[in-house]
Amino acid sequence: MASNGGSDLFETYESEYNALQAELKSKLEGQLKAQIGEQRKATLRAAEREVEEGEEILGQMELEVLNLPTSARTRLQAKLRGYKHDFDKIKRDIRRATTSAPTAAEREELFGFNDSTSDLDSTAVDQRARLLSGTDRLNESSQRLQNSHRIALETENVGVGVLGSLRSQRESIMRTRDTLSEADSYVDRASRTLKGMARRMATNRMITIAIILVLIAMIILVIWSKFG
């Protein structure tokens, strides 16, 4: 385990993810904006492969978090949700870059003329943009539902653990109560025994005193009969 309460393996995956995320942002914010034609397509294909690698790294991070103690798990799960949210945005940006209409420079390169006088079908472009926007919203809603389901499962697991702990504590209390009841019965029997012994000792003492008094009386009577 790492000194900060996390996992060495998780930190390794985290470093790999951060490096991959930086590479994808570099492609989106720099390379793709300056590239056209086959060069742009090659960059997009590389970006899609890196997206698959990033999803695999995030999956490994999620599995590693589930094996950690609860104290570390809660903190790292929050960090992991942030990573997933950022990565979803990167995936959306890459999908837009992949499906977006060609720029004027690309059209000029592909068709061999400047299309300043041509016009794309704006209605089809708008419909595709709305469709992509709706798909993104559906993906976000699906992700939120998955997160809610995972949180519900985690809460259920915590509840089961708490119930098990309470059941164990109840059994311990019941055993302790039975032990105390048994001890009380032993104390009561011992107390009655001691009282009985005390009564017998008092009775024996009185008998002993009575015998002594009788002996003294007999001795006095014998002496008196001899010298009287």
Image: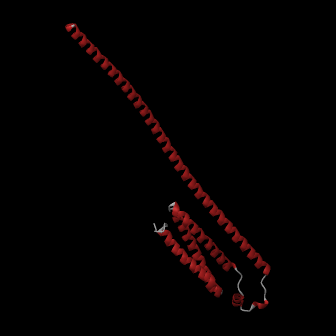
Quadrant that contains the C terminus: top left
The percent position of residue 168, horizontal first and vertical second, equals 50, 47
Instruction: Report whether 67 appears left or right of 133.
Output: left
Instruction: Report whether 115 appears left or right of 95.
Output: right
Q: Nearer the viewer, residue 69 or 126?
A: 69
Q: Nearer the viewer, residue 71 or 52?
A: 71
Residue at horizontal 52 percent and vertical 75 percent from the top: 16
Instruction: Report whether 213 appears left or right of 166.
Output: left
* Residue 74 in the image: above or below residue 214: below
Residue, far bottom: 113
* Residue 35 visible in image: no
The percent position of residue 142, horizontal first and vertical second, equals 67, 65
What color scheme is it?
secondary structure
Q: Nearer the viewer, residue 107 or 213?
A: 213
The quarter holding residue 183 reads: top left
Residue at horizontal 20 percent and vertical 8 percent from the top: 227
